């Protein structure tokens, strides 16, 4: 039997500069490792629903833009169905629901082109407002951060997840602001004033 009492836990590490090398090598110009980077888009041509483009930045507590941020997104299709098994029927085959987004290394801006997701049922049957789940990593972040992006022009008042946020004023940090037809802005603030709400998932 293997002894487990003499090994010490290794220290946690930040994502550092290596996360892009391993996850998005083609975007860095390191071609040939993979034919293409995984998660280029959550949708394929022909996806049903309203096309939307979301842009933003990830900022630290001092207001500095993290130009090396990497975000993974997960969403339902326009009918609120995730890929996989769902009693309501199959998901749109042109919606994978998952994307891996990198910030521009010069400006720090990230961009997600997708379709607006539909309402998804909560376990008790209530419906969650249309949203996109986000996982954020960058230098200085020991564990990936989980948050959600909701849309300004949707009715978010009855969403059971948002209803659980005690500090009601902070819900505003989860709302993507409409900047044009099908265009939204969502900046993620890691610390300090207007810190984005993060979820313990």
Image (spheres, grey):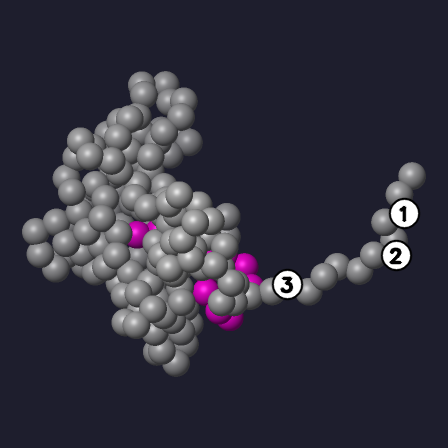
Q: CB atoms at circles 1 and 3 under 8 Å apart?
A: no
How far apart are labels 1 and 3 at the CA level? 23 Å
Question: Which residue is found at the position 32% from the left and 21% from the top?
Answer: 90
Q: CB atoms at circles 2 and 1 under 8 Å apart?
A: yes
Q: Quadrant of residue 103?
A: bottom left
Percent across and percent down for residue 24 are: 42, 54
Which residue is denoted by mark 1 in the rendering? 3
Stretch of the chain drawn in magenta: 137-149
How far apart are labels 2 and 3 at the CA level? 19 Å
60 left or right of 3 in image: left
Question: Which residue is found at the position 68% from the left and 65% from the top?
Answer: 11
Circle on res. 6: 2
Q: Secondary structure at mark 1?
A: loop
Q: Is residue 27 rendered magenta in the image? A: no
Earlier residue among tags 2 and 3: 2
Percent across and percent down for residue 30 are: 42, 57
**Residue ranking furthest to the left:** 181
**Residue ranking furthest to the bottom:** 62
15 left or right of 113 in image: right
Q: Is residue 58 above or below residue 86?
A: below
Which residue is denoted by mark 3 in the rendering? 12
Q: Nearer the viewer, residue 121 or 22?
A: 22
């Amino acid at each position: 039997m293997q002894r487990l009492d003499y090994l010490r836990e290794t220290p946690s590490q930040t994502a550092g500069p290596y996360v892009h090398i391993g996850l998005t090598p083609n975007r860095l110009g390191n071609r040939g490792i993979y034919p293409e980077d995984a998660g280029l888009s959550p949708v394929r041509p022909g996806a049903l629903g309203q096309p939307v483009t979301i842009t933003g930045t990830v900022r630290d507590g001092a207001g500095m833009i993290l130009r090396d941020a990497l975000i993974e997104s997960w969403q339902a299709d326009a009918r609120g169905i995730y890929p996989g098994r769902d009693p309501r029927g199959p998901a749109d085959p042109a919606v994978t629901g998952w994307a891996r987004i990198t910030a521009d290394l010069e400006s720090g801006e990230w961009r997600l082109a997708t379709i607006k997701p539909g309402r998804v049922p909560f376990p008790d049957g209530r419906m969650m407002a249309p949203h996109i789940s986000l996982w954020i990593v960058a230098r200085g972040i020991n564990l990936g951060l989980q948050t959600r992006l909701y849309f300004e022009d949707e009715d978010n008042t009855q969403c059971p997840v948002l209803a659980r946020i005690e500090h009601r004023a902070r819900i505003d940090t989860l709302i993507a602001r409409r900047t044009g037809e099908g265009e939204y802005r969502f900046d993620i603030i890691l610390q300090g004033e207007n810190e984005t709400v993060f979820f313990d998932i």
